[in-house]
């Protein structure tokens, strides 16, 4: 007796979307990280910054249209870059889901800066007739921060600050406490002697910052004996307190440079050993 049993077909489980498109995402990410593409985008970043600076001079009037067109083209390039980075975000954040990685990029520091860089392009397209449309050029000021992604120097500074962030928080917290204390105290010492200069505690804070950083603009200064004594003490303390974060950052820079040199030396030694073994 033949049994007409239909074999149970396994249910089709489609692969996760990221796995199916992984090759595409990695290709886009590789192109974004390529030196050629980064140099191309860097050209427009530097060009936009130079265009904004040059447009502030009076003799740039005949070239305002060309500068505006260049910024418009640059915004289009930044838009393409922004879209590609959103698509390739799963490669940048592999530990997160496909859409969660894209949200992470959108609300990250670089994601916000990339979004701001394309705002002029979008706003000009929809509000060409607005009398205040030229004000969106101010958004190009934030394009300076796009240089951080393409500059090894900025990346090194960011790495150093990340390493010593807890020490810096402690140092600047102490500075903030000292500023609050001295600003409030100076206000109550000087408010009766010069009510216009120290009209409120905010003026006391301004004086404290100027004295603490030893800048000394001279717009607000104490005239009472007690106020002058406090000002002298705050200035001396300020010199010592400002030196603390500077020393922390300097030592972190030196440690990072030494580590980098040690790694380079180790790499050279390993390369020499491999060459000797090959011979």
Image: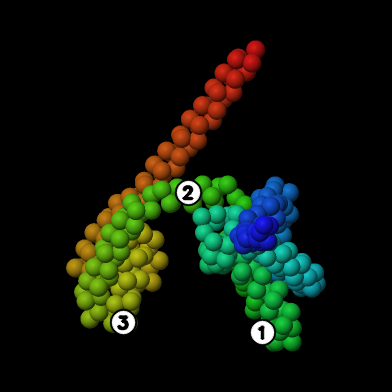
Asked whether residue 57 is in view, the answer is: no
State the SS at label 2. Answer: helix
Q: Is residue 72 above or below residue 15?
A: below
Residue 5 in picture, x, y percent from top left: 65, 61
Q: Is residue 179 above or below residue 238?
A: below
Look at mark 3 in the image and give the residue it sits on.
199
- Which scheme is used to colour this image of the protein? rainbow
Look at mark 2 in the image and give the residue it sits on.
159
Along the polypeptide, which appears first: circle 3 or circle 1? Answer: 1
Q: Of circles 3 and 1, which is in front?
A: 1
Which part of the image, by quadrant, shows the N terminus? bottom right
Residue at screen point 39% across, 61% down:
215
Residue at screen point 49% across, 52% down:
158
- Residue 191, by quadrant, is bottom left
Give me the C-alpha separation between circle 3 and circle 2: 42 Å
Look at mark 1 in the image and give the residue it sits on.
132
Residue 156 in picture, x, y percent from top left: 51, 47
Residue 86 in picture, x, y percent from top left: 63, 63
Along the polypeptide, which appears first: circle 3 or circle 2? Answer: 2
Q: Of circles 1 and 2, which is in front?
A: 2
Give me the C-alpha separation between circle 1 and circle 2: 40 Å
Q: Nearer the viewer, residue 250 or 268?
A: 268
Give me the C-alpha separation between circle 3 and circle 1: 36 Å
State the SS at label 1. Answer: loop
- Residue 228, by quadrant, is bottom left
Q: Is residue 165 above or below residue 206?
A: above
Residue 44 in picture, x, y percent from top left: 72, 60
Along the polypeptide, which appears first: circle 1 or circle 2? Answer: 1
Q: Nearer the viewer, residue 32 or 278?
A: 278
């Amino acid at each position: 007796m033949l049994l007409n049993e239909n074999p149970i077909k396994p249910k089709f489980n489609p692969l996760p979307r990221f796995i199916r498109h992984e090759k595409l995402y990695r290709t886009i990410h590789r192109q974004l990280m390529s030196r050629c593409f980064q140099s191309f985008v860097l050209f427009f970043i530097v060009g936009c910054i130079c265009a904004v600076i040059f447009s502030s001079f009076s003799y740039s009037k005949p070239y305002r249209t060309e500068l505006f067109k260049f910024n418009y083209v640059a915004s289009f390039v930044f838009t393409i870059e922004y879209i590609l980075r959103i698509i390739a975000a799963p490669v940048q954040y592999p530990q997160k889901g496909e859409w969660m990685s894209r949200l992470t990029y959108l609300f990250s520091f670089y994601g916000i800066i990339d979004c701001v860089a394309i705002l002029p392009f979008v706003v000009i397209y929809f509000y060409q007739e607005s009398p205040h449309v030229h004000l969106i050029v101010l958004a190009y000021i934030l394009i300076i921060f796009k240089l951080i992604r393409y500059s090894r120097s900025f990346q090194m500074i960011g790495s150093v600050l990340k390493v010593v962030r807890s020490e810096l928080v402690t140092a600047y917290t102490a500075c903030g406490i000292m500023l609050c204390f001295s600003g409030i105290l100076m206000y109550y010492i000087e408010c009766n002697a010069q009510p216009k200069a120290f009209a409120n505690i905010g003026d006391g804070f301004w004086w404290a910052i100027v004295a603490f950083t030893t800048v000394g603009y001279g717009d607000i200064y104490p005239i009472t004996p007690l106020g002058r004594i406090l000002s002298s003490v705050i200035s001396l303390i300020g010199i010592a307190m400002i030196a603390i974060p500077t020393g922390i950052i300097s030592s972190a820079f030196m440690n990072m440079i030494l580590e980098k040199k040690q790694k380079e030396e180790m790499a050279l030694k390993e390369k020499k050993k491999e060459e000797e073994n090959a011979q």
